Amino acid sequence: MDTSFSRSTRSGRTFASWDSPAVIPNPDFETASLVQRAVALEQLSRPADDLFADMDPIPGRPCTTHGGRRLFPTPPMDGAIDNAAASSSTNAGSLPPPPIPSRRHLPIPSSPTLPTTISRKRRAMLQSRKNRKKREEAEKAKQRKFGGPAPRAKATQKHAQMAELLATPTTTKQTRHAEMGYTGLPDPKKEQAQRAYGLEELTEVHGFEVQPWDGKTPFPIVDREGTMMGVAIGHPEDKEWEQLHQHAAQCLEHARQRCNPVLSEDDMRRGEVLDMPVLESLNSESCFQRLASFTSSAFASWAPALHKYYCEELGKLQAHDPSLRRPFDSSVFMATTYNLGPQTVCFRHLDSRNLAFRWCAVTALGSFDPKKGGHLVLWECKLIIEFPPGLTILIPSALIHHSNTPIAEGETRYSFTQYASGGLFHWVDHGFQTVEAH
């Protein structure tokens, strides 16, 4: 018998023959006997109760009882497998299929019973916490809707609560304001102050003190009673801030070149603005939107109660008249002014129509030496603050006379201010009607 394997083509030509010998089964191999032996082994592996249920006790080996059940001694196993296999081989044709061994299904232990109800006190506490969180979220959403994002707690802790105070000899109790308290009073000496005061004249003649400022460390300005009158907030910790405020100055210079001749002060206060497209273009610039958002957020960090007052009162105003437009959605201030330079220096003055007991924000822009010029002068405080470009200061502009020192020839200085008119708050508190109608 040829037990080799080879491959061939249809023509009979062989190729790549396999010379391995074929494996021939053992002719004495019998499957039936192996199956019978496996059945016998399975029967022997059944539990004792099932295997010997129908058998009588083995003679000479009495059974024992345990718990009411009869226990039989295990029969000897020597030769049991061979005998069972032989018996199965003899009666292979008549044996029924082996029964399936019975399986005992033990009950699955139930999990320990857990309390399905919470105590009434615990439930009330959880509900109270949930309601408080809901109110806080609603308040934050309200502030985000009107006054921009709420300040972060870490920023407030780092800057507002750990800053060193700058004390001044003045007192806010002596400031002048209108009878209703919403605005300041016009400056009676305004015509006498229409000139710039230099740094040397202010320090040597008028006895002012200079406050150096690097712009990185904010500080509050307080009167002799400890009342916070203003805050030098500086700028945020942003590596790109230098480029941002320089771009803002470039935008103002470009706007200056596009503007029409300046109107008289009386015309401007009556609202006859001829360069509205220029104003809207500046408001849409991302640099001024970022400045406005930072200023409003810093305002909320240093004076959260005042910031909330702005949000609530001016929010009522805008809800009453949705046609009103704010310069920046992320700021609580309702008005803004751009001083287009190119050498913006304010004379000694009051912004008497601003809200008397609140702040306005002043941001210096341009390119000048803050050690030599461009300072912010607070007259009642006898204080001169170095005011580098890109920084912001919050002051009560309706109560404190303020001005700037001149800058050198060839330098540029612009300013970006944000404020709210006291008349708006007066209007809201009187139910959106005049004093006579109220």
Image (cartoon, rainbow, N blue to C red):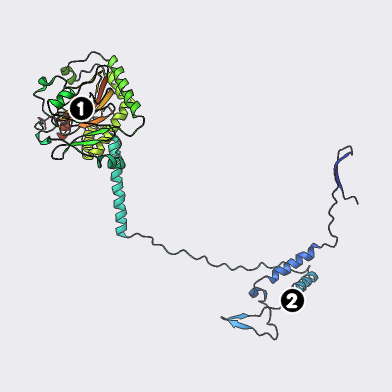
Determine which quarter of the picture holds residue 80: bottom right
SS label for mark 1: strand
Residue at the spot of label 1 = 376
Residue 316 shown left or right of residue 86 in the figure: left
Residue 255 location, x and y as percent? Answer: 29, 18
As drawn, is 171 to the left or to the right of 163? Answer: left
47 displayed left or right of 237: right
**332 versus 58 height, above or below:** above
Whichever of labels 1 and 2 marks the residue nearer the N terminus, that label is 2
* Numbered label attached to residue 78: 2
Q: Front-most of 59 and 161?
A: 161
**In the displayed structure, would residue 163 be above or below residue 201?**
below
Q: Residue at x 12, y 21 (%)?
A: 193
Instruction: Identify the secondary structure beneath mark 2.
Output: loop
Q: Are marks 1 and 2 in contact (CB under 8 Å)?
A: no
Q: Relative to the observer, which residue lies in front, 128 or 407?
A: 407
Looking at numbered disc 2 in the image, what kind of residue is underneath it?
A: Asp
Q: Is residue 215 left or right of residue 69?
A: left
Task: Determine if residue 243 is in view.
Answer: yes
Which residue extends farthest top? 261
Residue 114 % position (x, y):
41, 62
Quadrant of the image occupied by residue 382: top left
The crowding category of the residue bearing disc 2, from other C-alpha atoms within 10 Å (few below 14, some 14 to 19, many at least 20), is: few
Q: Position of residue 314 (x, y in %)?
A: 22, 33
Residue found at x 24% / y 38%: 302
**Front position in the image: 278 or 51:** 278
Q: Amino acid at mark 1?
A: Leu
Residue depth check, mark 1 versus mark 2: number of the one nearer the observer: 1
Q: Position of residue 304 (x, y in %)?
A: 23, 39
User: Can residue 329 be seen from the camera position used here?
Assistant: no
Residue farthest front in this picture: 204
Q: CA distance from mark 1 to mark 2?
A: 113 Å
